[in-house]
Each structure stands twice: as structure tokens, then as C-alpha cells.
Image (cartoon, coloured by chain):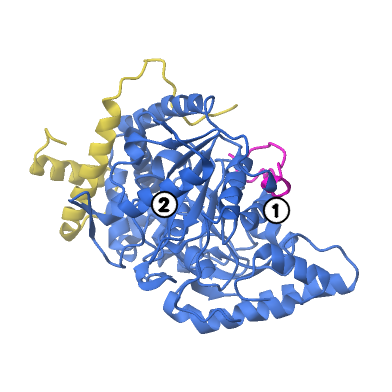
Amino acid sequence: MAETDEDSLEDFIHAGAKALALPLDPAWMPAIKANLEATMSHALSVTYFELADEAEPAPIFRA
Amino acid sequence: MNEWASAGDIAKAVTAGETSALTVVQGALARIAERDGPLNAFTTVTAERALAKAHAVDEARAGGEPLGPLAGVPFAVKNLFDIAGLPTLSGSRINRDRAPAQADSPLIQRLEAAGGVLVGALNMGEYAYDFTGENLHDGPSRNPHDTVRMAGGSSGGSGAAVAGGLVPLSLGSDTNGSIRVPASFCGLFGLKPTYGRLSRAGSFPFAASLDHLGPLARSSGDLALAYDAMQGFDPNDPVCSDRPAEPVAPHLQRGAQGLRIAVAGGYFKRGATPEALTALDRVATALGAIDEIEIPQAQRARSAAYVITATEGAALHLDRLRKRARDFDPAVRDRLIAGAIVPAALVVQAQKFRRWYRQAVLTLFEQVDIILAPATPCTAPAIGQQSFVIDGVEMPVRPNIGLYTQPISFIGLPVVAVPVPLSPLPIGVQIIAAPWREDLALRTAYALEQAGVALAPRSALYDWTN
């Protein structure tokens, strides 16, 4: 999350947790931030791989 | 029977009347009582039902009934499998409050239908979100080759119980490497079958689109026996394939003759310790595998698996996070909370990439039958170890243990992890095949065993004269 500073990441975590009604203890914040940074870094690396607009997600649903 | 006897040899001896199932199971229970303290592999020992089941096997033989291929074989399961009468812990404190399971999981039922005898439930990392085998609530499972070291996770007890000689066979689960990592650290054979091959009904999930179940054992033959006994459609697992069972055990002796085998290059050689590369080289040399093959975008595959795991795991545990956040292992809780708030668009993109990657890798299997890769970048680290040095670079241990397993399970390929008995600690190599070709991976593992290259080493900590 190169473009995101520390405060805005914390704001994002607070907003996300509030939206999902998840409890947050300030003592948990450093670990949650570190984990979110790692996950977002992995996720963003995937988005930089060009896929066709027609690409279908992997899970298959058969009616 | 000696305590390192294979499941196959136990079943033959019980069937021939050379020993009784009761004697075998009593022996296993005695070893668990003697050795499990330091190993911490078991969370529950089901002695009463095991003795009753062993008695039933002996009664069946006395009555002239045919016995199954696992007659009298003691086995144990990771504690995320349902066992009738016990809450399914999945390594957690929270699940201790669950109602006891009403029935055994289908895979336990199938192993027992083949004559196997369940002797207990095994320690694991909390909710399977783990590569170490450490557990905050039950204590770490310990490596039988050196008890200050990790058994590997999350199926840590499944590795420790088999490598410690307590049982010849265990079941584990593998979402990102949780069978292959303990197999590598403990020096065992482990099978992660094709996604959808073995029923996951009656097991506590983690990341549904990545979860697999499978066996760990001390030989490829025992993996095949267990795998064959567990195959078959189950309508209670929505992704369980309706392909007919394809027994592998009768074909093992065909070995690797005629198979096109290549070594995974690029990503799968970066970040590996000399031990991992030595083991890979021994396996490749024994198989005459000289070609190297590039699995495209393997690093992104691992990244996408990481994202899907975090978010599917978070979705599974959302309500528990709301109500009982303080009862989780904090390391698991903080990863899950982070996973819960990852933007959905990123998850969908990871799933789209997954289909692209699947197709790209399947194309490789037009050129080769088997791909070899390290199972773990290193031998078992010390319990609690936070970092290791590879190529002069210090890296955190926990997130990097699954470097080489994640890109493979991401698209559900079948893999056998084979142990290479380096000294002082063993390490595993992945034998990777195309979907539904467990037979080829197990035949290759068998060939390596016959060549003396793959071997489950006995721990120097025990007297093996029995």
C-alpha cells in the first residue's frame, strides 16, 4: 500500500471493522495493520497482472 | 509387529492371524501413553472405542468374514475431523463449546470400514491458519527428530504421531500446505489429493475453495492404501467429484518408468536453503529428470492464494470474531480481522487470476507428467523461531514456510510429498501431477522409495528394537 500512509490505513481498518461490527482493541492495531499491509501487497500484485475483460473467476456454479 | 511396521504389513499380519488387531491397538495405545507427553501430538485418545473396534475386527476374522485392506491398523486424525461424541476443536478454544459431533466424518468411516481403528484426535494450529504446528491452547506439537523443533503445520500432530512411531497412519488437511509441510519437517510421505477427490464432509473448514483432506504415512504404499479406502463420491461435500474411484495401490509397482519428469525452476529454486536444493537434486537425479520447467506466475499464484485464504477464512469466522474475539489465538485473530476488510474487488481479481493460472499450468502437463519442487524452503525450524537466513537475507519464518506449497494447492493439483533423509533433519520434495493423476505421483514416490532416495527416517530419540 505504497500510496497509503499509516493514518489512512488505520482509518480504513476502523471503518471496515465498524461496518462489519467487529471489535477492535487498540493493542491489536499494529498486528492487524501489518497483516492488512501484507495481504494488500499480495492482492495488488495480482491486480497488476493483465487479464481479459472476459476472464471468469475460478469458482464454478452449476445450476 | 514392530512399532515401525507399515499399515500394509499390519493388515496382512492381522488377516493371516499372525497377530490380533487387539494386540496391535494395545501396542499403539501403550506407545501413545509412553511417548506423547514430549511430542504433544494427541489432544484426545479414544482408547475405549479403539479397543472395541479392534475386538470387532478380531471377531470378524474368527467368524470367517473377509477383512479389509487396513485390518487392525491404528490411525489418528487432525482434530478438525468429526469424531462421534467429541466436539470438533479445529485447534481452537472456542470450539470446545460446540456440541459433540453426532457421527464420524465420512473419511473416518471409510477407513474403519476398511478395518482401520481410530485411536484419537491430533493437535493442530488454530483453525488450520498455521504452518508451524504450534498451538496457543494445547501447546506445540513437537518434531520427533528433535523435540525443540516444529512438527510443521497446521497438521502438526498428524506429522508427530506418525514420525514418532505412535501410529502408522494419520489424516490431515491441506489448504496451503498443511499436509506437505509437516510431512517435510517430520520426514514422512504425505498426499494432498486433487481438489474435490476426497470428501470434506464432517470436517471443520478453513478456506472452502482451497481445503483438501489427505493422509500422512511412512511409505507410499500406505498412502495408496488409505487413499484407495477413502475415495468415492459424497453428496454431502458440494465439491466432491462424482468420478468413479480409481484405485492406485495395484499400480504402484509400475514405478516411474516412462514418465516425463521435469524440475520446477525459477520461483521454486529461489529462497531455498542448500538442504532443500540437495533433496531436490537427489530426487531429480534418481528419476533422471534433467529438464527444467517454468511454472508461470508462481509468485502471483502464491499471492492470490494468500488473499483468498485470508478472506475466505475471515468470512468463515466473522461471527466468532464479533462475539469471541478474545478467545482466539491473537495471531490468528489479527490475521482474520485484516482479512475481513480486504476490498472485495481484490478477491474477485484473485479468483479470476486463478482460472488463468490453472489453464497455464494445465498446458505444462501436455509436455510432462510430473513436476518436482521443494516442499519447504528449509528443514524444521525451532519452535518459536521468528526468522531464518536464506542466501544471506533474513526472512520471517511463518509466512515463508508455504512458499512452494501454495502455488500448487491453489489450483488443486495432486501432490505427494516424499521425505529425503538428510542428516540431522529430513526435508521433503513435492511430486506434482495433473488433476486426478494421483496414481502417477504415488508411482513416482514408490520408485524413489525403491531407489532408497525417499525414506521416512526413524528418530534417533527412541530405541527401535521393539
The secondary structure type at the circle numbered 2 is helix
Height in image: A37 above or below B173?
above
Residue closer to the observer: B408 or B195: B408
Disc 1, disc 2: CB below 8 Å? no
B213 vs B269, left or right, is right
Height in image: B377 above or below B324?
above
Chain letter, disc 1 residue: B
Residue of label 2: B279
Taking the magenta stretch, the answer to whether it contains residue B246 is yes
Chain B: colour as depicted: blue
Q: Tag 2: Cα neighbours inside 10 Å, few (<14), some, or many (≥20)?
A: many
Chain A: colour as depicted: yellow
Question: Which quarter of the picture shows residue B141?
Answer: bottom left
Q: Is residue B271 visible?
A: yes
Residue of label 1: B229
The secondary structure type at the circle numbered 1 is helix
Q: CA distance from mark 1 to mark 2?
A: 30 Å
Percent position of residue B327, x then y: 34, 65
Count of numbered badges drawn on the protein: 2
User: Residue flagged by tag 1: what amino acid is it?
Assistant: Ala
Quadrant containing the N terminus of chain B is bottom right
B347 vs A23, left or right, is right
Q: Tag 1: Cα neighbours inside 10 Å, few (<14), some, or many (≥20)?
A: many
Q: Residue at x 61, y 75 (%)?
A: B3
Start and end of the magenta stretch? B232-252
Nearest to N terminus: mark 1 or mark 2: 1
User: Main SS type for the magenta part?
Assistant: loop
